[in-house]
Image: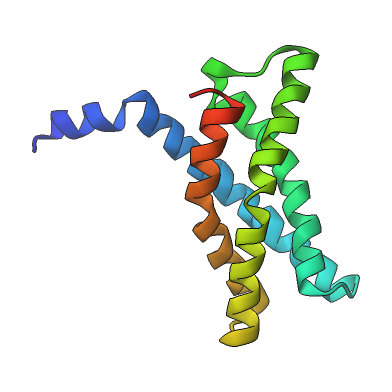
Amino acid sequence: MGTEYVQQVLGRPLAVRLRRFVVVGAVAAAVQTVLLSLFVEWAGLNYLVGATVAIEITIVFQYVLNNAWTFRERRNDGRRAFLRGLLTTNVVRGSAIPIQLSVLFVLVEWTGVLYLLANGVAIVVSGLYRYALDSRFTWGA
């Protein structure tokens, strides 16, 4: 495999979109982790309740970033399209919440992993699922 071939593969639209999705996801994961910590440590919420609230906040955050950058060639422009996309991503990503919370619960309760570390693992586990559904249904990619 030559360097030229690798550059060609990495420059394809799917590869570019996937890299951008991962960057947005990493930023959102950091935001979600900070929010989760604040909700649990400062507000005294149960870690699963705090995770649910943090996830919903980052769903909106990620939609805005992904719509503007990751899927900009398929961007949901205009108020109606933007709101329809926001609703769609909430349904798609909302369907991943049970996956993420289940992984979080199992890691914390059954294996004793710290909740913030377990949340990071849960984000990664549900990430490919979210990408596949979001790219198809929210942006029609």
Image mark count? 0
Q: Residue 139's x, y, as percent?
A: 57, 24
Q: Is residue 96 above or below residue 38?
A: above
Q: Residue 111's x, y, as percent?
A: 56, 86
Q: Residue at x 59, y 73 (%)?
A: 117
Q: Is residue 129 above or below residue 75?
A: below
- Given residues 132 and 19, the one toward you in this image is 132
Q: Residue furthest right?
A: 43
Q: Residue at x 55, y 17 (%)?
A: 74
Q: Write down the quadrant of residue 55 in the picture.
A: bottom right
Q: Write down the quadrant of residue 17 in the picture.
A: top left
Q: Residue at x 48, y 39 (%)?
A: 132
Q: Quadrant of the N terminus?
A: top left
Q: Residue 38's x, y, as percent?
A: 82, 66
Q: Residue at x 40, y 31 (%)?
A: 16
Q: Residue 19's x, y, as percent?
A: 43, 39
In the image: residue 73, left or right of residue 49: left
Q: Please name the colour scheme applied to the rendered image.
A: rainbow
In the image: residue 55, left or right of residue 10: right
Q: Residue furthest left?
A: 1
